[in-house]
Image: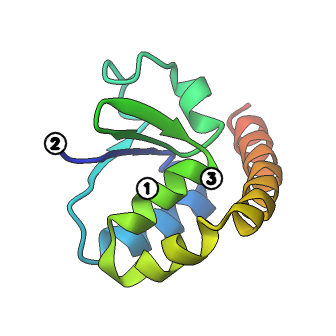
């Protein structure tokens, strides 16, 4: 069972980062959340746009933990996984990620209106 990654292609920063990941060796399945609401996650586009989400072994993972799953599945980025999975570093990473996620969500929400 492959890992499915749900990302916001309409967010220019998100798109640039995901495009980098897509060009690296990986077995991830990539889903632009703007294509259609996901039957897989049962979440709306708005809910999915708030954070990165992945479906890993049938379990939905979001936010900083989702990035760990992505990096674990990209051989060139395994080092990020190994470093940022450490408890203290993970909490710092997760805190900073949540700030960035809120800023990007609001930026993209107001850009659409």
Residue 79 position, x and y percent, is 48, 82
Task: Residue under label 2, please give it.
Answer: 1
Choose the circle earlier in sequence order: 2 or 1. Answer: 2
Q: Is residue 89 left or right of residue 11?
A: right
Circle 3 is placed at which residue position? 64
Residue 110: x %, y % from top left: 78, 37
* Residue at the front extreme, as displayed: 87
Q: Are marks 2 and 1 in contact (CB under 8 Å)?
A: no
Residue picked out by circle 1? 69
Q: In the rendered view, does 86 fall on the left or right side of 94? A: left
- The residue tagged with tag 1: helix, strand or loop? helix
Q: CA distance from mark 3 to mark 1?
A: 9 Å
**Viewer-proximal residue among 18 and 59:** 59
Q: Quadrant of residue 58?
A: top left
Q: Mark 3 vs mark 1: which is more N-terminal?
A: 3
Where is 49 relative to 2, above or below?
A: above
Q: CA distance from mark 3 to mark 2?
A: 21 Å
């Amino acid at each position: 069972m492959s890992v499915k990654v749900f990302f916001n292609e309409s967010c220019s920063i998100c798109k640039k980062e995901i495009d980098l990941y897509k060009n690296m060796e990986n077995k991830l399945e990539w889903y632009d959340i703007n294509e259609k609401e996901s039957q897989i996650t049962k979440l709306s586009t708005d809910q999915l746009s708030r954070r990165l989400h992945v479906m890993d072994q049938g379990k939905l993972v979001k936010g900083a933990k989702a990035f760990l799953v992505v990096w674990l599945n990209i051989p060139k980025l395994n080092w990020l996984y190994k470093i940022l999975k450490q408890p203290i570093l993970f909490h710092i990473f997760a805190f900073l990620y949540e700030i960035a996620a809120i800023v990007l969500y609001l930026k993209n929400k107001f850009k659409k209106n």
